[in-house]
Amino acid sequence: MTKHVLAQNQYGKAENRIVHVTRKGNDGSWHEIRDLNVSVALRGEFREVHLTGDNANCLPTDTTKNTVYAFAKEHGISSPEAFGILLAKHFVTSQAPIHEAQIRIEEYAWERISVPTRKEQHSFVRKGQETRTSQITFSEHTGQLQVISGLKDLTVMNSTNSEFHGFIKDKYTTLREAYDRILATKVTSRWAYSAAAASDGEFDWDRSYAKVRSHLLDAFAETYSYSLQQTLNQMAERVLDHCPRVNEVRLNLPNKHHFLVDLEPFGLKNDNEVYYAADRMYGLIEGTIHRDGVQPVIATSDWIVA
Ligand SMILES: O=c1[nH]c(=O)c2[nH]c(=O)[nH]c2[nH]1
């Protein structure tokens, strides 16, 4: 029998998605968020764990995950580096068999959507450009030029001012009513211009794009939401109200769920500070709003992935 050698090994929970909300100001209405993807890898005396099934030296990956969320509550997240240092030191100094801990953190950066008319600041847009889209169709039969513009991958978040309750409860319903939740979505939108705009040689398409984008953002930030469906309608209505040459707006809004982490088992109270950001599954809320009397033209069957 050849002898086999257990060489380098490490383990831990990877990709702990965490969103931490800090409330500042006298009334806590100025929110700051940190959005991290934290992976933990532990190295040390784990020969027995691999070779004999003796788990005496094994700190469960589940515990490493809990530690990440509990540390966010206990210490806050001043920077990914500072948070990583706290975690790495903790694992190595608290458990004898753990000799080395490696914490890898990706941070997703957000910018504030500032709403000048209100003091509360809890609306954010993910840094990095969204993709601008357009579809132009010209038909020789009708002589009609059709322009459908749009955007995708515009990720936005409100860290408060979102509720969801009063919904149907049947025997399969387990969802709890929410009176203060995070509302986040990655916006895909397309909007159709009037035929007059499409054939107006002077029309400023760049300016119009910027205007629609900013109305979508403002409506998202300013809507006190009772469902993502309601937010969807507000966003589209805002565009139709302010952009006379847009006839129809379609929105595909994946509900990027953020679940409050239960910190009670560690004797910690989670005052809507520490969230688990799930990437799947997601609610997918879609709809078209158009001017009365205008025939909708935007396809409704596209496959949208969050
Ligand atoms: O805004 C929401 N709309 C829903 O239809 C829904 N369903 C659900 O589980 N959560 C939510 N949130």
Image: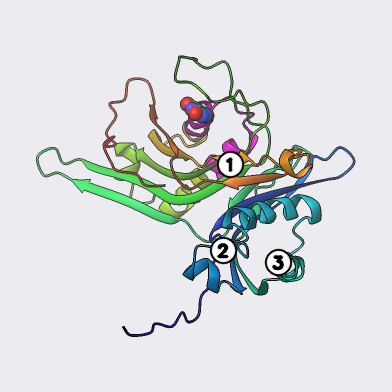
The dot on residue 91 is 3
**Can you tell which quarter of the image residue 198 is in?**
top left
* Residue contact between numbered discs 2 and 1, judged by CB atoms under 8 Å: no
- In the rendered structure, which segment of residues is drawn in magenta? 214-237
- In terms of secondary structure, where does tag 1 sit? strand
**Can you tell which quarter of the image residue 77 is in?**
bottom right
Residue 10 seen in the current view: no
* Type of the residue with mark 3: Phe
Few, some or many residues within 10 Å of mark 3 (<14, 14–19, 20+): many
Beta carbon of the mark 3 residue lies under 8 A of ligand 1: no
Is 165 above or below relative to 54? Answer: above
Q: Position of residue 87 (x, y in %)?
A: 71, 65
| Nearest to N terminus: mark 2 or mark 3 | 2
Numbered disc in front, either 2 or 1: 2
The dot on residue 12 is 2
Is 141 above or below relative to 224? Answer: below
Nearest the viewer among 249 and 220 is 220
Question: Please, which residue is most extreme toward the bottom here?
Answer: 2
Q: Position of residue 231 (x, y in %)?
A: 54, 30
Which residue is painted at 20% across and 40% down in the image? Answer: 144
